[in-house]
Image: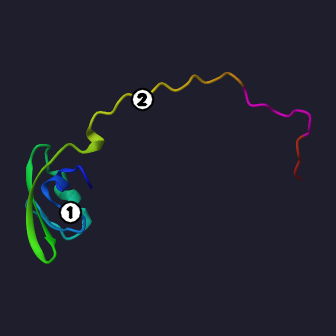
Amino acid sequence: MNDTPAAESGMKAGDVVLQIGRTEVHEPEDILDASFFLTAGDVVPITVVRDNEKITFNVRAELHPASQPRPPLLAAPPLSNRGIPLNLQSSPERTP
């Protein structure tokens, strides 16, 4: 993705990740496991294969977007005190 530490370090879409730091990557879950031990500001070597060539990038970890402060939510409009209109003119259906 653009504007990410990986993209800024030179990694590209299609690169196959082999290793993050000391963690070898064999399946997608390995990337999540490796990221668990990273701290924002750490510089982590990430080794990839691109066009049959191994390349290592040094990527500075940032805070995950979900952990960054969010702007406060706007106040919801007040609920009205109007009820749900009912049709009381018809008789209820009865089932045997």
Range of residues picked out in magenta: 83-91
Q: Nearer the viewer, residue 18 or 1?
A: 1
Q: Which residue is mark 1?
A: 12
Q: Is residue 89 left or right of residue 16?
A: right
> Percent from the top left, x then y, of residue 72?
38, 28
Question: Looking at the magenta stretch, what is its main secondary structure?
Answer: loop
Asked where in the image residue 52 lies, by quadrant, the reply is bottom left
Residue 33 shows which numbered tag?
Answer: none
What residue is shown at x 19% (from left), y 71% (from top)?
A: 26
Residue plotted at (78% across, 31% down) = 85
Density class for disc 1 (Cα within 10 Å; few <14, some 14-19, many ≥20) is some
Tell me where residue 76 appears, x and y as whole percent.
52, 27
**Few, some or many residues within 10 Å of mark 2 (<14, 14–19, 20+):** few
**Where's residue 6, x and y in %?**
18, 55
Q: Which residue is disc 2 drawn over?
A: 73
Helix, strand or loop at mark 2: loop
Q: Residue 3 at what x, y percent from top left?
A: 23, 49
Q: In this picture, is 8 found above or below 53? A: above
Q: Residue at x 17, y 45 (%)?
A: 62
Q: Quote the CA–CA distance across marks 1 and 2.
A: 35 Å
